[in-house]
Image (cartoon, rainbow, N blue to C red):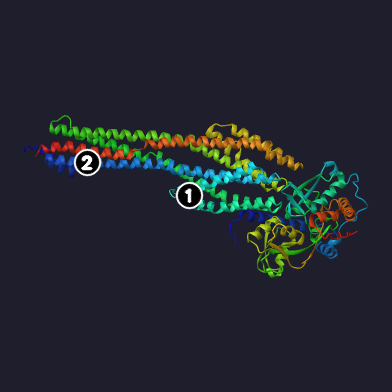
Amino acid sequence: VNARPRPWRRALVTVLAASGLALGTAAAVAAPGHPSAAPAQAAAARAAACNPEASSLRPSGAPQVTSGSFMAKIRTRGYLIAGVDQSTYHFGFLNPLTGQIEGFDIDMIRAVAKAIFGDPSKVQFKAISDAQRISDITNGTVDIVAHTMTITCQRLQQLDFSSVYFESHQKVLVLKNSAATSLASLHGQKVCATTDSDSVTKIQQAKAVAVQVPYWTDCLVDLQQGDVAAVSTDDSILDGLAAQDPWTKIIGGALTNEPYGLAISKQHPEFVRFVNAVLQQMRTDGQWKQSYQHWLGTPVPNPPQAQYAD
Amino acid sequence: MTASVAVKPGQQAPAPIARSAWWRSRLDGATTPTRLGLLLAVLVLFSLAWGVLAGLTASQHASAAADVVAVSEPLSLDAEQIYTSLSDAGATAASAFLSGGLEPTAARQRYEADVAQASIKIEAASALAGSSADAAIGNDLAALSKYLPVYTGEVATARADNRLGFPLGAAYLRETSTLLSGTLLPAASDIYTRESALLTSASAQATGLPLVVVAVLAGLGLGYVLLRSSRWLARHTHRVVNYGLLLAALVGLVSLVWLAGAFALGRADLLHAQQQGSVPAQAFARAEVAVLQAHAYESLTLIDNSGDDIYQKDFVAEQKLLGPGPGTLLGAVEASTGNSDVAAQAQAWFQAHARLRGQDNAGAHADAVQSAQSGAAATTFGKLSATLTEGIGARQDVFASSARSGRDTFTGLAIGMVVAALVMVAGCAWGLSRRLAEYR
C-alpha cells in the first residue's frame, strides 16, 4: 500500500462530499411538493410512477428554433455551453494529441449545436467533474450536460433528461492477476469511484470500502499504484479505462441497467423536446451508429428506442 | 643586598575600608620581594585571563561569521533554489500538457534542467545539513530525496500516457501536482524558513555587542592595572621605565585596538550583508515563489478547463499575497530595494491574466491557452520572473561578498589574542623578575 500523504486530494474529496451533501439537503428541502398534499406523500407518489427509461418529453417533428425559446437565446449568445467530461476515454476526453475534447458524448453535443447554428463547432465546452453535473445545470452555468450521466428517479426530481441515448451496465475493473469475480467478492476491500456517482452507493451496498476521487482516470491511477483493489462503474467507462491499461480486466455480470441521458434544466422543457428531436434524427439517419462505431467499435447495436412520459 | 623597606607604623592601624583590610594588612606587613612576587602573579594571571577572554570573544565571533558564510547562507540559498526549480518544473510540466500534440522541446529541456538543478541542490544541502543546528532540516531533506524520484516517475508516466493519446496522462499530471504542492514544496519551504532563521541568529551572534563590550572593558581594566603597577614600581625602585611592563602595556593596547577594530569592521560588513544582501534577497525569493505558484495555477485552471475553478481561486490568493502595496510580498521587495519595476511588471502580468480568464470564460479557450503559452500572459510572466531571479542573484552576490569580507576581518584574531597575552605574560615576568633579582 502506498502510504504517501495526499492531503490535497483528501481535502478536495471532503469538500466535494460536503458540498454534495449540502446540495442534496438543499434540493430535498426545495423539492416542489404538491400544494394540497404532504410533500413526503407527493415524493412517494412520484417515485412510484417514475420510469427513468421513459421520463422525457416528446418532440414535435424535426428540431426547430422557435422565437422566444431557450434555443433562440442560445443562438443570440453565439455558442452552446456544454458541461462535459474530459477524462472518460471514448465518451468525453481531452485528446492530448489534438488538445480537443472528443468522444461519443461530445458527438451528441456537436449534433445539438449543428441543429441550432448549422455549425457543430459553436460550442463552449466546460469540463466538469461528476459532482458538478447537477449543480451546474440547476444554477444555469451550462445549458446542457453530456457526461455519461445515468437517468435516475432521484435526479429527475432536480433536472430533466433527454431520451435515452446509450445503455450501459455497472461492472468491475480489476488487475489481470486479481482473483475477484464480482463486486460481492471484493467485500471489505477498497474500491474506487468518483465522488457523488451512484457507484459509491453500490460499492457501499456490497460492503466494500468506497474510495472517492474527482475523475475516473484518478481511479485507474490508484489501481495502478495499488491503492485500491478495483474500480466499479458503468462498463462504458470501464472499457475506456481498460483500453489505457492492458493489464486490467472487466469482471462481473451486468449489475444494473444504466440508461444515459443528456441533462437539461427543468426550466427549459422546449429545449428538452428540441434535443430529443435531434437525437431522434441521429437514431434514424445513421449518425448514432456512425459515432458508436468510431468511438466504441463493432459490433454496433441498434440505438436505444426513445420512450416518452407524455 | 639586604636592603629592606621600612614599614611605617601608621599603616598598621585598622584599615578605613573593611573590605580591603585583610589583604592590605598582609601586603603592608610583607617585604618588597614578596610584594613584587605577588604583583608578578597578579599581572600574569590578569594577562592570561585577558588572553582567554579576548581569544574566546574573537573565536565566538569568527565562528559565527564563518557559520553565516559556510553553512547558513549556502543552505538557505540551496533551499531557495530547490524550491524555485521544483516550482518551475511543475509549472513547465503543466504548461507542456496544455498545448496538445507533442510537448515543445524547449519545455522538456527546461523541465529536465529544473529537475537536475533540484537534485544537485538537494545533495549539496544534505552535505551541509550535518553542520546545521536544526535537526528538522535533515528530515525535510530526507523527504525531498525520497519523493523527488517518485515525482519524476509520475511525470514520466504522464508523458508516456500522453504520447499514447490517453486521458490517463492528465490524471498522472494531477497526481504530480498534488505530490509537488502537498509534499515536496512544503519540505523545501520549511528548510528555507528554518535556515533563514538560523542565518539571522548566526548573523546576530556575529554582530552582537555584549561579549565584545566585556572584553574591551576587561582590556581597559588590565591597562589600568599595568599603569598602576609601573607607577608603583617607579616609586619603589627608582627606575622611571620598566621595559617589561611597557612591552606588556603596548602589546595589550595593540591587541585591544585590533579586537575592537576587527569587530567594528566585521560587524559593519555583516550588517551590510544583511541589509543590502540577505533581507532583499529573501524578499525577492518570497515574491518569486508566489509568482511561480500563481503561474502553475494559471496553467492548471486552463488544463482543468472548467472556467474559474479552485485553481483560479488559488491564483487570486497568491495575487493578493503579492500585492503590490504595504504589507505584501512585492511591497517588501520595493521597501528593501527601492525597485518599483517589479510591481509594474506584476501588474502587467495580472492584467494579461485577467484578459486570459475573460477569453476563457467567453468560450475562447484556445486564445486563452495561446496567451498562457506564447502570448501576453506568457511574455509578462517571463519578464517578471526574470527580474525576480536577477534580483535574487544580485542580492545574493552582495551578501556573499560582504559576509566573506566580514568573516575575513576575524581571520587570525583569536590566535593573535592568545599570542598577545603570552607576550604580555613574558613582558611582565621579564620586567618584574629583573627587579626581583635585585633583592637576591
Describe the element under mark 1 as helix, strand or loop. helix
**Amino acid on which the number 1 mark rests in the picture:** Ser
Q: Residue A29 appears at what percent x and percent y? A: 77, 57
Q: Where does the N terminus of chain B fall, quadrant-wise?
A: top left
Q: Chain of mark 2?
A: B
- The reply to whether residue B317 is visible in this rendering is no
The residue carrying mark 1 is B126
**Amino acid on which the number 2 mark rests in the picture:** Val
Q: Residue B170 appears at what percent x and percent y? A: 68, 51
- The reply to whether residue B280 is visible in this rendering is yes
The residue carrying mark 2 is B44
- B385 sits to left or right of B304: left
Q: Chain of mark 1?
A: B
**In the image as oriented, which residue stretches furthest toward the right?**
A61
- A241 sits to left or right of A110: left
Q: How many residues crowd mark 2 within 10 Å: few (<14), some (14–19), many (20+)?
A: many
- Mark closer to the chain start, 1 or 2: 2
Q: Where does the C terminus of chain B fall, quadrant-wise?
A: top left
In front of the other: A146 or A54: A146
In front of the other: A302 or B421: A302
The answer to whether A56 is drawn above or below residue B373 in the figure is below
**Snapshot quadrant of residue A239:** bottom right
**In the image as oriented, which residue stretches furthest toward the left?**
B2
Q: Residue A142 appears at what percent x and percent y? A: 78, 48
Q: Residue B365 appears at what percent x and percent y? A: 74, 43
- B343 sits to left or right of A94: left
In front of the other: A164 or A111: A111
**Snapshot quadrant of residue B360:** top right
Describe the element under mark 2 as helix, strand or loop. helix
Q: CA distance from mark 1 to mark 2?
A: 47 Å
